[in-house]
Amino acid sequence: MANTTGIATLSRGARLVALSGMRLYGVVLALLLSSAAAWAGVVCPPGCRDAETSSELEPTLRLELFASDVQPVTVAGGVELGRFHATLVLGAGRGSQYAGGLAVGVTLGGSRAVELDGAVLLVQALTAQASGLGPVSLLDYETDLLSQLRLTYRWTLAERLALFAGVTANYEVSFGPNVVLRGSYVPPLVRLAPPTGGGGHQLWPGALAGLRW
């Protein structure tokens, strides 16, 4: 009984540490995107804003199909408004995991070829502890939280078609009593996990490439 109580206490502690870390990450992410938006205005050459028409400030559809170290097949759809954009993301294909969430970003520079994005994704894993047979088994056992910073460059192929590629910084939190599942094809650069109770953290660099309409 004492051992069970200890594991539960460790699990709650890991959860509190993870939530505190994510709050701090959110503040840093907001500051980075705000700074990027300001920098986008600074580096815009004279006259580039005059060239922007009112139609460019209207919402336009944005679609992406890409591969990354997290999942080999990912689709994203959303809207663009001027230099800013937001997309819903869903990826699958690596093992028994899939990931979905929200990404927001800003386009940098006068050429609008460079983009900085922040994404928050829920990673669902079908494992022995969460076979998907129970109504809430995935939520209780194998839901991790992945946060990403992505820096990409775009090459225009046609009027509404572009190739893009870039690098990512990834931070994934696993909640107890889960073990820390590998979050990528790339081995983690940093992996922190308690000796008992489950849960933990991992960080790694990654990459992605795909098509954008």
Image: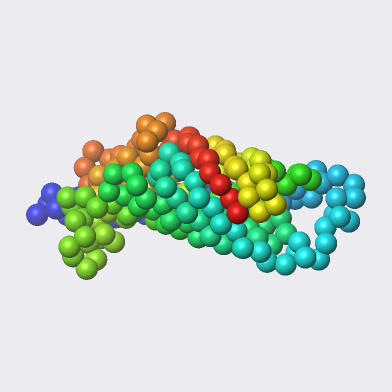
Q: How is the image coloured?
A: rainbow
- Residue sitting farthest toward the front: 158
Q: Give the image location of residue 112, x and y in percent.
A: 73, 47
Which residue is rendered at x = 73% and y = 59% of the image? 82
Quadrant occupied by the N terminus: bottom left
Report the front residue among 111 and 28: 111
| Front in this rendered view, residue 18 or 131 | 131
Question: Is 97 located above or below residue 204 in the figure?
Answer: below
- Quadrant assignment, res 130: bottom left
Q: Is residue 43 visible?
A: yes
Q: Position of residue 111 (x, y in %)?
A: 76, 44
The residue nearer to you, when weighing 154 against 44, is 154
Task: Answer left or right for 189 relative to 63.
Answer: left
Q: Quadrant of the C terminus?
A: bottom right
Q: Is residue 17 visible?
A: no
The answer to whether 54 appears left or right of 136 in the picture is: right
Please report the residue visible at 63 percent of the width from the left and 58 percent of the height from the top.
85
How many numbered tags mark residues here? Answer: 0
- Residue 21 vs 206, above or below: the answer is below
Question: For the point 33% across and 44% down, which residue is it?
Answer: 94
In the rendered image, residue 17, in percent from the top left (x then y), is placed at 38, 50
- Residue at the spot 68% in from the left edge and 66% down from the top edge: 59
Q: Position of residue 147 (x, y in %)?
A: 47, 49
In the image, farthest residue toward the left: 1
Relative to 64, 124 lies left or right: left
